[in-house]
Structures are given as C-alpha cells and as structure tokens.
Amino acid sequence: MSMLNLARFAVCVSALGWVAATLAQEGPKLGVPATPAQVAAWDVSIAPDGKGLPPGSGTPGQGAAIYTAHCQACHGKDGAGKPNDRLVGGQGTLRDAAPVRTIGSYWPYATTLFDYIRRAMPYVQPHSLSDDEAYALTAYLLRLNGVIGENDVMNAKTLPAVKMPNRSNFDWAYRDPAAHGRR
C-alpha cells in the first residue's frame, strides 16, 4: 500500500471512529420519546390471577357478533381455523402424536386469553377493541370451547375464577417431561 493510500485509509478510519463516537453519545435522533400517557396506554399486561384486569364485562352472545366482524376471516367460522390458527376443539389430544393446541385444550388461564385478545387482536389492528369487546370475545371463545355457559358473564371478578381444562397439566414440561412420555 502506498503512503498516499495509507494516509487516506487512516483518515477514513479516523472519520468513522468520530462518527461512531458521536452517534453513540447522541443516538440517531429518530422519533420522539414516548410520553408517560402513551406508555401507560400500552402497559396492559394481565396476570394469571387477574391482577390488572380492567373494568367492563361481556357475554358469549355479545362476543359472537364481535367474532364475526373481527376474527372469523382469519380463524374461520366458530373458531374452526383457516387460514390462521384453530381456536376451538382439541380436548384430549395433547398426548397424541398430532396434538391440537387450542384455547380449550392447551391454554392454562382464561386471563391470558383476555390479555392476548386485548393487546394483540385483531391482527390487522391490535389494541383496537374496547375492554367490553375483549371480555365479550373472551366469553364467546370460552363458550365455544365448552369452558363456560352461554349466559355466563366475564368480568374482572369472574374471569380469573374460570378453570381451564388443561391448567393442572400445563407445567408438566418444567417438572419432568420424561414422566409424561415427552422429551
């Protein structure tokens, strides 16, 4: 390498080092900091015991219309699946060669279902359902899976009390998978 090329190389390395140091100190200056109100609006996690559940309520009957309008295109009529995940059925299949993991066969807590619906659904417009709509949709899906009755009301008090069919088996992989025929 000639002295001229070596000098050019040194200048480039020095300039890149200066640019990197400047960016590391100041950041790329993209976007704006989130306000406390914006952070609070998305801080909506719900614990399995129901801690963090908002006010509101819904029934399976109310949830049926919401499902048709917001969910059926992706999850099929009555949660049967296609083009996306199946939401209903599968009870008793988890130890089969081809288990069917649905809300009623796999999920351990009804509060997790509410949390997921409210935070991430519908897929094309997440976090767009009201709390009442999320409760109603949760109730509808629990009803389709035979977990609650058709007139049951889901709210911050009743939802954590729902006993999901697989709750007692959900943590088997963390205890001893070999004892359950899994590896």
Image (spheres, rainbow, N blue to C red):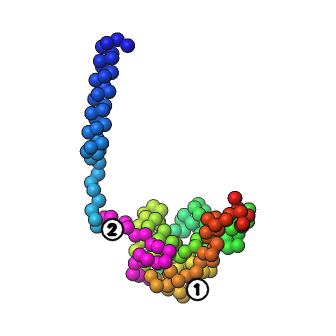
* Quadrant location of the C terminus in the rendered image: bottom right
Instruction: Name the amino acid, label 1.
Output: Gly
Q: Residue furthest front?
A: 175
Question: What's the CA distance linking mark 2 and mark 1?
Answer: 34 Å
* Front of the two marks 2 and 1: 2
Residue 100 visible from this viewpoint: no
Name the magenta segment's main secondary structure: loop
Q: Position of residue 3 (x, y in %)?
A: 31, 12
User: Dot 1 surroundings within 10 Å: few (below 14), some, or many (20 or more)?
Assistant: some
Q: Position of residue 79 (x, y in %)?
A: 59, 70
Instruction: Name the amino acid, label 2.
Output: Ala
Measuring 27% from the left and 62% from the top, which residue is drawn there?
Answer: 35
Tell me, yes or no, whether the highlighted magenta stretch contains residue 48: yes
Label at residue 40: 2
Tell me, yes or no, whether the highlighted magenta stretch contains residue 164: no
Which residue is denoted by mark 1 in the rendering? 149
Q: Which residues are magenta?
A: 38-57
Foreground of the two, 25 or 131? 25
Measuring 55% from the left and 74% from the top, which residue is drawn there?
Answer: 109
Measuring 50% from the left and 81% from the top, which residue is drawn there?
Answer: 159
Horizontal side, residue 146 vs residue 36: left or right:
right
Foreground of the two, 15 or 57? 15
Name the secondary structure under disc 1: loop
* Quadrant location of the N terminus in the rendered image: top left
